[in-house]
Amino acid sequence: MAAVPSGNGSKIGNGRKGETACGYAVQEQDGVALELIDQTLDWGLLRCVVADSYYGNDFGFREQLRSRSLLYAVQVGTLDGGLGH
């Protein structure tokens, strides 16, 4: 998870779920990654995505890349945990 600014980063959080005391929203790491991907798409800078197995093993993340018509190369782990049995 990551803490990202929630609106005005200087405000004090009110203890609501998903918000820290410093006014930062708590967001899953893949959500942050997708927001950054969308931002670079808006800027016209993104051509493809390269990611490690944290993202590659997440079918939902790969599905989001496909829904954006992005080319991607991601590491995908083995079903046996990479032990090579």
Image: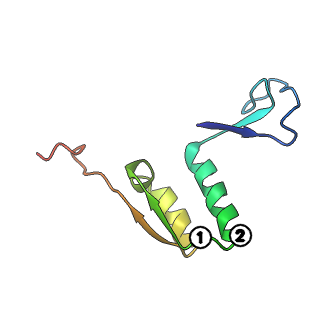
Q: Residue at x 61, y 57 (%)?
A: 34
Circle 2 packing at 10 Å, graded few (<14), some (14-19), many (20+), is few
Q: Where in the figure is residue 52, as x and y percent of width and height?
A: 40, 52
Is residue 22 placed above or below 53 in the rendered structure? above
As shown in the figure, which amino acid type bears the numbered disc 1?
Leu
Check the image and name the residue furthest to the left. 85
Horizontal arrangement in the rendering, residue 84 relative to residue 75 (left or right): left
Q: Which part of the image, by quadrant, shows the N terminus?
A: top right
Circle 1 packing at 10 Å, graded few (<14), some (14-19), many (20+), is some
Q: Where in the figure is residue 71, as x and y percent of width and height?
A: 48, 73
Is residue 37 placed above or below 81 in the rendered structure? below
Q: Quadrant of residue 27?
A: top right
Quickly name the residue at label 1: 46
Q: Quadrant of residue 38?
A: bottom right
Q: Where in the figure is residue 67, as x and y percent of width and height?
A: 57, 71
**What number of labels is visible?**
2
Q: Which part of the image, by quadrant, shows the C terminus?
A: top left
As shown in the figure, which amino acid type bears the numbered disc 2?
Trp
Quickly name the residue at label 2: 43
Which type of secondary structure does the marked residue at label 2 adopt? Answer: loop
CB under 8 Å between callouts 1 and 2? yes
Q: Residue at x 77, y 40 (%)?
A: 5
Horizontal arrangement in the rendering, residue 84 relative to residue 18 (left or right): left
Distance, label 1 to label 2, CA atoms, is 8 Å
Number of the label disc, if any, that sits on residue 66:
none
In the depicted view, which residue is nearer to us: 8 or 17?
8
Is residue 65 placed above or below 82 in the rendered structure? below
Is residue 72 placed above or below 34 in the rendered structure? below
Q: Residue at x 72, y 69 (%)?
A: 42
